[in-house]
Amino acid sequence: MFDFVRKHTRLFQFVLLILILPSFVLLGVEGYSRFLDGSNAAIATVDGAKITQAEWDAAQRQQVERMRAQMPTADPKLLDSPELRKNVLENLVRERVLAAVVRNEHRSISDKQLEDIIRTDPQLAALRGPEAKAILAAQGMTVDSFLVRLRQELEMNSVLAPVAQSSLPTQASAGLAFDALLQQRELQFQGFAAKDFAATLKPTDADLETYYKDPKVSVKFQLPESADIEYVALDQSALQAGVTVNPDDVQKFYKENSARFTLAEERRASHILVKAGADMSAADKAKAKAKAEQLLADARKNPAGFADLARKNSDDPGSAERGGDLDYFGKGAMVKPFEDAVYALKKGEISNVVQSDFGYHIIMLTDVRGGELRPFDSVKAEIEADLRKQLAQKRYTELAEDFGNTVYEQSDSLKPAADKFKLTIQKATVQRKPAPGATGPLASQKLLDAVFTGDSLNNKRNTEAIEAGGNQLVSARVVKHNAARLPALADVKAAVAAAWVGDHAAQAAVKAGQARLAELQKGGGDAKGLSEPLTVSRAKPGPLPQKALDQVMRADAGKLPAYVGVDAGEGNFLVVRIAKVLPRDPALIDATRAASQYAQAWGAAEMQSYYNVLKAEYKATIKPAALKATAASAPVN
């Protein structure tokens, strides 16, 4: 276990991020919303306390920004869909409900409980190490603030977790559920594809005109609202390219920051672990310590045989097979008692018995590396880049206020700001949401919000200086506002004709398929056109698309053969003949695993049911108008 912690530092970092990121929205919402100018009207209430529109907007904005960082090319319509906004609001409500239960039932995680959790969890054991602190700092958190959030999460988890854990469905019920889920069906099918009917369809101009007037059709061709803009950006990175660094300053920085350029000392050690966990009795611990003392005596008698001694006696399986070798590591990688002992040793020395949360260790220091000052020439470029960045930051700070004043005071044009700060006026056409793959200022929702204000659209004035990203100020000016509009049929005739053909070909495919289905159901048709028999299940769909498979598996098979018509999507229709219903394949999942998975699903269902009871008890409500407004604000294709 001890070796596992050391060898999985990256996994430890990942787990910390998993803990931090999902809940960071909820932690930051209340504080962040105080800085917003949004509405303070309640859109939901829990236990008499309101959730405001501003809080919802802040949570949604942070969720979208996080998703955009993970998926830069994602369609903005997906990132700001009604479904996503609804989920964000429901998550806010869920946390408020659980927080209310914790508060009213006086649930709490004591300092000792929290310390025990951290001490016994290998992924949290090094929480106070430098790597963990760096990860937390990158998320705007300290160790202390992370522990506050961890305590809150544990307290809220204590409300629902016992319900899931108490679920005890029988293996028999699990078997019945999986029998139904993984049932197999032997079938034949015949497909009718829209593309096979398209060649015969020739729409007239009158057909297209009538088709285009249908609101369900015309909305597909509507051009969204947009604005043709000019913009200028005061960017620290651009300023940095023009900064010259004094060579004397580089030398001075090197001398004054020698610690920074000293290679971190790393130590290599081998150890023998005698396990003695917190749950071990005092008597057993005494035996473990006595064993460790004897191993220490043996090691000091024959230091050259340390590796063999570790292979035969160490309880740390990861390092025992390597003769106890832990490879090189720096400060903060090991638990403190172990680290202190290692850094007190000289090369070749063997420590006294060292006690940690894992048990008793005998440690031999086998090597030391690092600690030397890197040569000036090897760090010169790095120092120059740092100084250039510092100078650019200083210059950017000096110019930022002046830039903001200039675009505000001379708001009818960006040229004065461009001339004064030697910036290039750039042009773009933008919509209210960033385009997929947008970068730089055009990816900034704040800038787009400013562009589409009434003052910008109607008076063509410069926007205020907007912080569009890290150390970047942008001001934009609307040159032309393009309202959402439906283009003339003549301008999109080819696309409308293709859509008409696609729709009518799909209708023809369905009609032909339904005629064939009726023929088979009456017993008047033969097997001509049907595929060879095949067996499908939810686990093994074969050639059937998921949409078709779901309909086939749900079809009534009480009387066989059964015939069903299936909408397979994308203009395809299937006629399916179900010949046999077969039991599930036992090789797919064994009884023990089935019972485990069923218990998890059952526990999740019971937990959701209990949460629904709590929602009612704490009068958690979402105003219908809020969800209606969300749906209405969904972007139009």
Image (tube, rainbow, N blue to C red):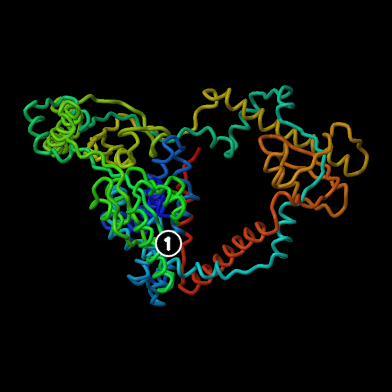
Which amino acid type is marked by label 1?
A: Lys
Mark 1, residue position:
275
Closest to the observer, 312 or 601: 312
Q: Is residue 625 something one can see in this rendering?
A: yes
Q: On the image, which quarter does residue 367 sit in?
A: top left
Q: How many marks?
A: 1
Residue 202, placed above or below residue 319: above
Q: Indicate left or right for 584 with 154 as reference.
A: right
Q: Is residue 37 something one can see in this rendering?
A: no
Closest to the observer, 346 or 471: 346
Q: Indicate left or right for 164 with 620 as reference.
A: right
- Image x and y of residue 307, in percent: 40, 47
Q: On the image, which quarter does residue 618 sit in?
A: bottom left
Q: Residue at x 62, y 58 (%)?
A: 597
Q: Which residue is at the far front?
A: 301
> Which quadrant does the N terminus fall into?
bottom left
